[in-house]
Image (cartoon, rainbow, N blue to C red):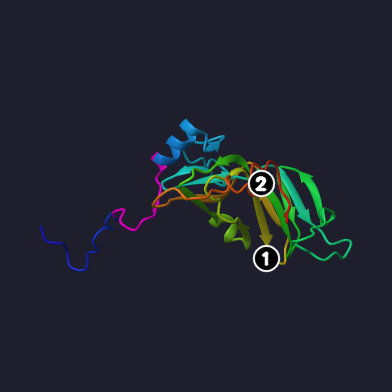
Amino acid sequence: MDKPAGAIAPPRAIGNDCGMSILSDKWIREQALEHGMIEPFVEAQRRDGCISYGLSSYGYDARVAPEFKIFTNVDSAVVDPKDFDSNSFVDRHTDVCVIPPNSFALARTVEYFRVPRDVLVICLGKSTYARCGIIVNVTPLEPGWEGHVTLEFSNTTPLPAKIYANEGACQFLFLKGNEPCETSYADRAGKYMGQRGVTLPKL
């Protein structure tokens, strides 16, 4: 049967001939339930009156825990990644964190991750926050790494911004390499290995 004029063909599935592939909900579920890759694990998207979280088609939307470190500069300190002063943060345990204008807060995921040796995990912020000028930043989770993921929420707006604990914060995408790496994060005893809670910069 001929296609109507101007019709667009549906997207075609792409074979795994590029050496790296993004992993599906089926694979994520299996790794989480059988090997503890994500704990606790939510098998389907939850969106009932909250910012969505849980398993998606090709990723996992993680929640932010109710533990926050809000940046403050009451002492006019200099931010030094090599010698970070913990006094630059105010600790809050709350269901709703308010970040001051043009400031940021550190938090962590509810979920504890264990990354397989042949997988790299990247993170993208939820569009709900991005459309409000709130940026979520996470560096890639390396092969063999495990721990709570420390999240950085940047409020780029001139207004106070709310972050909702125990709701979706960011989406993790799992990329499978062409083969297991020679040296994993665990092999080299990375400084953020096994971190729990909100973890400040280390040298």
Residue sitting nearer the eye, 31 or 129 = 31
| Disc marking residue 108 | 2
Query: At which x and y percent is residue 177?
Result: 42, 52
Furthest-left residue in view? Answer: 1
Q: Could you say whether the residue bearing mark 2 is in a helix, strand or loop? A: strand
Amino acid carrying mark 2 in the image? Arg
The residue under the point 85% across, 54% down is 87
The answer to whether residue 173 is visible is: no
Residue sitting nearer the eye, 118 or 182 = 182
Furthest-right residue in view? Answer: 75
Q: Could you say whether the residue bearing mark 1 is in a helix, strand or loop? A: loop
Q: Which residues are magenta?
A: 15-26
- Image quarter (top left, top right, bottom left or bottom right) of the C terminus: bottom right
Quickly name the residue at label 1: 156
**Mark 2 neighbour density, 10 Å: few (under 14) some (14–19) many (20 or more):** many
Query: At which x and y percent is residue 66?
Result: 70, 42
Residue sitting nearer the eye, 182 or 105 = 182
Query: At which x and y percent is residue 133?
Result: 62, 63
Query: At which x and y percent is residue 107?
Result: 69, 49
Q: Residue 135's image quarter?
A: bottom right
In this view, 21 is above or below 41: below
Left or right, 159 with reference to 61: right
The answer to whether residue 190 is visible is: yes
